[in-house]
Image (cartoon, rainbow, N blue to C red):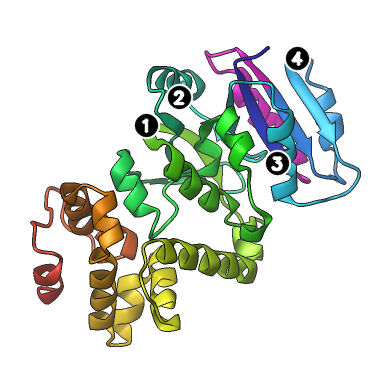
Amino acid sequence: MPQTTVLIPTYNCGKYILETINSILQQSYQDYEILIIDDGSTDKTSEIVSSIKDNRIVYLKQSKNLGIVKALNLGIKIANGKYIARIDADDIMLGDRLQKQINFLEQNLDYGMVGGGCQVINEKGVFQRKLEITTENDILNIGLLFRNQFTHSAITMRTQLAKKLKYQQKYIYCEDFDLWTRFAEISKIANLPYYFVSYRWYSDNTCHTKQKELRTALALLFARELDKLKINYSPEELMMQMAVNFGLGYKLFVQKNKLQQLKDWHNKIFESEVLKNRFDAKAITHFRNNVLPQIAGYPVLKKGDHIENNQLENYFSNL
């Protein structure tokens, strides 16, 4: 049995999937199966996959398109590996990702999943930018209250936990965000400080084409997590949280002269007794003073600068 299942759901990604598979085959780590769940593609995906002669490739094509959540859960159900490494059919695996992530999980049994850095490429594979990441468990946990802290295509998780938790249809188009929050409740989580994937961003991405559905699912997810913290919130405050998720917190509310409302909302979150009991006070302060400004889209400080322990009030007043 392979130690790891590399899980690739795909739907009409024939023009990219060969590059994706080749990037996996080039990894130094080789103890895997590549499980491709074809969600009813109508392009030449099946021909392309069948042209690759490697007995570690398992290709399963469904007769019709059932959606990403069902495809992912089918892959989890039949995965043979101790670990599941995710990558999408239009992304590219980088560096020594599999070996580094498997080593980490083997050596840190209290961690249920591990991610890593991501660089963004366009439809033609041209580099666009690198995304900054947070690595520590507590900071990631707090960060999940505001924004997804993981790149789906850069995640490796313990199969036993994935089979227990599964993806949820209710949170379609942010199904990964939901899963990471539930992983964080039963295990530690981490990002490793390496770039593990080139994430392809283009107009056909579901994040572009399913904006309404994405926002609906995100609202449900944030409402659920705020309820867990026993934080009362108004529809407008929930919208503030959504704006922060999209990096618009500062920009949107300063334009509307409602920056004080955003500050008051963040005060309410960090005054939650549940949150203060769950996380170390130093981690909360570090997140609030150094990580939240980046997430919320506040003006970027000069290199080498950082915010002292001032609860952001002085920072806002000096803008």
Are the residues flagged by discs 1 and 4 in contact, CB closer than 8 Å?
no
Q: Which is more N-terminal, label 2 or label 4?
A: 4
Q: Which is more N-terminal, label 1 or label 3?
A: 3
Q: Residues within 10 Å of mark 3 (few under 14, many from 20)?
A: many
Q: Residue at x 17, y 51 (%)?
A: 281
Task: Give 248 or 108, whichever is nearer the viewer.
Answer: 108
Q: Secondary structure at mark 1?
A: strand
**Residue 96, position as x, y percentages in the image:** 46, 20
Residue range (magenta): 11-33
Q: Secondary structure at mark 2?
A: helix
Is residue 192 at all visible to an observer of this figure? yes
Question: Mark 1 to mark 4: distance in Å?
Answer: 29 Å
Give the label, 1 or 4, closer to the camera.
1
**Residue 11, position as x, y percentages in the image:** 77, 45
Q: Is residue 17 magenta?
A: yes
Q: Secondary structure at mark 4?
A: loop
| Label annotation for residue 101 | 2
**In which quadrant of the rendered view does residue 302 lie?**
bottom left
Q: Is residue 110 magenta?
A: no
**Residue 140, position as x, y percentages in the image:** 35, 46
Q: Which is more N-terminal, label 2 or label 3?
A: 3
